[in-house]
Amino acid sequence: MKLLKDRILNDGKSLAGGILKVDNFINHQMDPVLMKSIAVEFVRRFADLPINKIITIEASGIAPAIMLGYLLELPVVFVKKAQPKTMGDMYVSQVHSFTKNRTYDICVSKEFLFPEDKVLFVDDFLANGNAAFGILELIQQSGASLLGMGFIIEKSFQEGGKRLRELSGIRIESLARIKFLEVDTVGFEED
Ligand code: 5GP
């Protein structure tokens, strides 16, 4: 997606350790116009699938997911990274974060995921794929089907994309695929 890649080149900052900082348009300050274009592109890539629900994970997945849910007129469920005291029955799985170097529980209430659901997962980044596999585990616990996974940015020099594309029956799409990331240099995969 050219608009997104141009924005990453203009406003993204590559940090040591293969981290891309996009705090001024995705992860802290958000650009709703770009976010709308991102959602339109997700519609183009997924609208042929019989999805009835969008799932994401707090916090940075919520913006693209709600835009997409608005366009497709589908409910959006965000998975939580901490178990609220008020939540009753829930599905729980674990995610290891390399950026934060810790493992944490993620959860979703049993009230919002059912065996008949056909789900699309949306998130900001795909790196090693641990968050995505944690989500897949929650969806499997509920008996729902995961039909697709859409990421704004994939760092294809990490393993997540390869691991996810080995799964059968799940469409994986990333709007900008970063091949290499060095301090002050970003290189994209050919589309
Ligand atoms: P994964 O579970 O695929 O290893 O990592 C995905 C999560 O880690 C994303 O939801 C995002 O929050 C965070 N993450 C991974 N790499 C980056 C990065 O380069 N920049 C930012 N801003 N977040 C990242």
Image: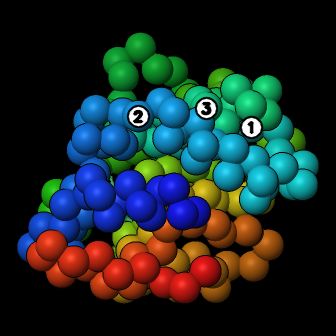
Given contact means CB atoms under 8 Å apart, are the residues at marks 3 and 1 in contact?
no
Whether the residue carrying mark 2 lies under 8 Å from ligand 1 is answered with no
**Marks 3 and 2: which is nearer the front?**
2
Give residue 123's position: percent from left, percent from top.
49, 50
How packed mark 3 is, by other alpha carbons closer than 10 Å (few <14, some 14-19, many 20 or more), is many
Quadrant assignment for ligand 1: bottom left
Closer to us: 187 or 97:
187
Q: CA distance from mark 3 to mark 2?
A: 12 Å
Given contact means CB atoms under 8 Å apart, are the residues at marks 2 and 1 in contact?
no
Q: CA distance from mark 3 to mark 1?
A: 13 Å
| Dot 1 amino acid type | Lys
Quick one: quadrant of the N terminus? bottom right
Label annotation for residue 53: 1
| Dot 2 amino acid type | Asp
Lower sequence index among marks 3 and 1: 1
Left or right of 48 in this view: 164 = left
Whether the residue carrying mark 1 lies under 8 Å from ligand 1 is answered with no
* Residue at the disc numbered 3: 67
Whether residue 114 appears in this view of the structure is no
How packed mark 1 is, by other alpha carbons closer than 10 Å (few <14, some 14-19, many 20 or more), is many
Secondary structure beneath dot 2 equals: loop
| Dot 3 amino acid type | Met
* Residue at the disc numbered 2: 31
Left or right of 21 in this view: 57 = right
Q: Is residue 68 above or below residue 172?
A: above
Q: Is residue 110 above or below residue 167?
A: above
Number of callouts = 3
Q: Is residue 130 above or below residue 63?
A: below
**In the image, what residue occupies the spot 78% across and 53% down?**
44
Give residue 38's position: percent from left, percent from top.
58, 47
**In the image, what residue occupies the spot 61% across and 80% down?**
191
Lower sequence index among marks 3 and 2: 2
